[in-house]
Image: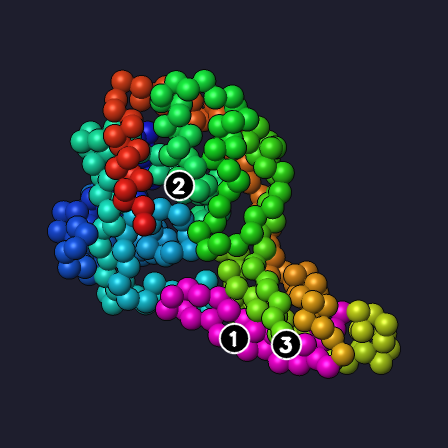
Amino acid sequence: MSERSGVGLVELAILEALDALGAQPGQPYQPNAMVLAAVEDLIGLAPGYAYEVLLDLGRPWTMPVSLISPCGNFGSRGHDQAADFRYTESGLTQAGQVVLAAERGELAPVPVGLINGNTHRGGTRPPFRPQGIIEALRQVSWHCGLSDAELAALVGPPEFGNGCTVTGDFAALAAGRGTILRLEARVSVGEDSVVIENLPPNANPDDTAADIANRARPHDWASRYPALHQQALLPLKDLRDESRAATDTDRLVCVPKAGTSPDQLRDQLIDVYGVHTTVEVTLPQPLAVMLRGWVGAHQDEDLPASLASLQDAIP
């Protein structure tokens, strides 16, 4: 990864290709076939491999700071596959431009890698709230003398871009120890239904809806194990999938059977994997050490200016 942004070699090649093709913010999108051909010229990576990275850079559920703007079908977290790269287009976001400026020495380094993490590609570094990382680094660069605990509190817990709830041993994570986070959808109770929204980013919404529906159906072993079946069966009268793949909006509406309150159904739905998931995370060093080390490595540059530029580039 680059020391000036934390962005990987392939990601940088994609940003450079977009910039060279004139796909700056406010300008027309460029065909991804042309982008990937330029990437192959830059680093020799075949389009089929580079396309997967490009898709991640444009998918809103993968990372807090999006570096490219997608046009066309980039797929979904469900079973909707992305269209072939011959039929999609991309453009740089303002944040992508800031990364390129930092890489070229036109700005001081920016902490995009610290913010985005790498769990979206199967890594163990979780994403964090952009403003939390930026403010903590700003305080370190100003030599405010904050303790490790105060810096960790400024950053806050990991934050995944779709708004799911995150719980776990945040103190262990901040100390550089591995831990398991629980990611949970927002499950709200209405007058006669339960609404599930903001599914965890590592959940497949299509599979989650199918699993909920399957757990509401009687099984052929019900007569042999009635007590177990009654315990496992979801008291669900109706399930409506009102999700919108085009906007990556999750929304499952669950109506309980007669005799079951929405609160009772909610308590059972939360235990369905997909409504909640887990992810193993760790940091290579304690969080405060990483923050101070990042500032120390670039202390001769105008970090407050670059942090302000990144902050302005994040919607």
Mark 1 is on which residue type? Answer: Asp
First in sequence: mark 1 vs mark 3: 3
Q: Nearer the viewer, mark 1 or mark 3?
A: 3
Image coords of residue 198 (percent x, y): 51, 60
Using a 10 Å C-alpha cutoff, classify the residue at mark 1 as few (fewer than 14 neighbours), some (14 to 19) or many (20 or more). Answer: some
Task: Kindly identify which residue carries mark 2.
Answer: 130
Marks 1 and 2, how far apart at CA: 31 Å
SS at mark 2 in the image: helix
Mark 3: which amino acid? Asp
Q: Nearer the viewer, mark 2 or mark 3?
A: 3
Q: Which residues are magenta?
A: 232-258
Badge 3 is on which residue?
A: 192
Among numbered discs 1 and 2, the one appearing first in the sequence: 2
Q: Residue at x 36, y 28 (%)?
A: 138
Residue 54 appears in the rendering: yes
Residue type (three-letter) at the residue carrying disc 2:
Pro
Q: Is residue 277 magenta?
A: no
Q: Are marks 1 and 3 in contact (CB under 8 Å)?
A: no
Q: Position of residue 239 (x, y in %)?
A: 59, 77
Magenta span includes 252: yes
User: In this picture, is 110 found above or below 198?
Assistant: above
Where residue 171 sits: x, y (%)? 60, 33
Q: Indicate the quadrant where residue 230 lies.
A: bottom right
Residue identified by numbered label 1: 241
Q: Name the mark nearer the viewer: 1 or 2.
A: 2
Residue closer to the observer: 311 or 278: 311
| Residue 46 position (above or below residue 221) | above
Q: Which mark is residue 119?
A: none
User: Left of 141 or right of it: where is 183?
Assistant: right
